[in-house]
Amino acid sequence: MAQLVLDIETVGLPIESFDEAQREYLLKWAEREETPERQERKREDLIAQLNLYPFTAQVVAIGMLNVQSQRGRVYYQAPTKESWRSEDTLIEFESGSEREILTRFWEDVRLYRQIITFNGRGFDCPFLLLRSAILGIKPSRDLMPSRFDAKHIDLLEELTFHGAIRRFNLDFYCKAFGITSPKGRLSGPQINKLFAEGKYREIAQYCFDDVRATAELYRRWRELLSFEDKAHS
């Protein structure tokens, strides 16, 4: 079975969707600031960070690329059903609710023997597992095998030699290796704004740009640094 490159995009849930006790818990650090102005800035920062956690955010896009065939798929949230393809027809885009896109993801990912991510162990995979649990969706496979299990190649761990050297973000690694970075036109924090503006297709395309960059970074790592070639073990 083939290898799959994976990436997700998330958006924080509205602060109003949490009850009073939850809001107090989420925003308590703002109250410790010295002035009302600093408190408001801290409050805005805390709300902006809600998209980082599966208990305070939702999955709005899931991008996937088959390493062998170079065909891919993006499931993304949108209020209306739609499907379309990239200009080269290799990438399919399909909309749905969060529940629907997670369900379709689990149907697809079970077919692959290995997944490849950038910081997937620290973000994408725990997020997918926990959001699925919250929505009552049963995963089709374990995305978090033991750290050195080749069923999941996390490039952030590989490029830091499992914590031996400093971590950098995807944008920095792409530029270091001469790979076109998707962060030139967008970044993660801007996804909240795009979602609020109803620019769902733009989010889907950005998600796949991250997937494509991760796939190219994986190719470089496999050719130059994978001494034991464990990607094919």
Image: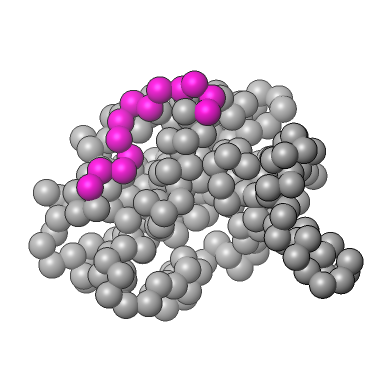
Is residue 142 covered in magenta?
yes
Q: What colouring does the structure picture have?
A: one colour
- Residue placed at 21% from the left, 70% from the top? 225
Q: Could you tell me residue 183's position as x and y percent?
A: 58, 65
Q: Could you tell me residue 136's position as x and y percent?
A: 49, 21
Give the tally of numbered discs.
0
- Residue placed at 65% from the left, 64% from the top? 185
- Residue placed at 84% from the left, 62% from the top? 40
Position of 13 with respect to 119 (left or right) is right
**Residue 199 visible somewhere in the drawing:** no
Q: Nearer the viewer, residue 162 or 116?
A: 162
Q: Nearer the viewer, residue 102 or 179?
A: 102
Q: Could you tell me residue 71's position as x and y percent?
A: 39, 41
Residue range (magenta): 134-146
**Residue 154 visible somewhere in the drawing:** yes
> In the rendered image, which quarter is residue 32 located in?
bottom right
Image: 117 above or below 37: above
Position of 141 with respect to 136 (left or right) is left
> In the rendered image, which quarter is residue 216 located in?
bottom left
- Residue placed at 32% from the left, 56% from the top? 154
Position of 50 with respect to 126 (left or right) is right
Is residue 104 covered in magenta?
no
Image: 105 above or below 114: above
The quadrant of the rendering that contains the N terminus is top left
Question: Dominant secondary structure of the magenta stretch?
Answer: loop
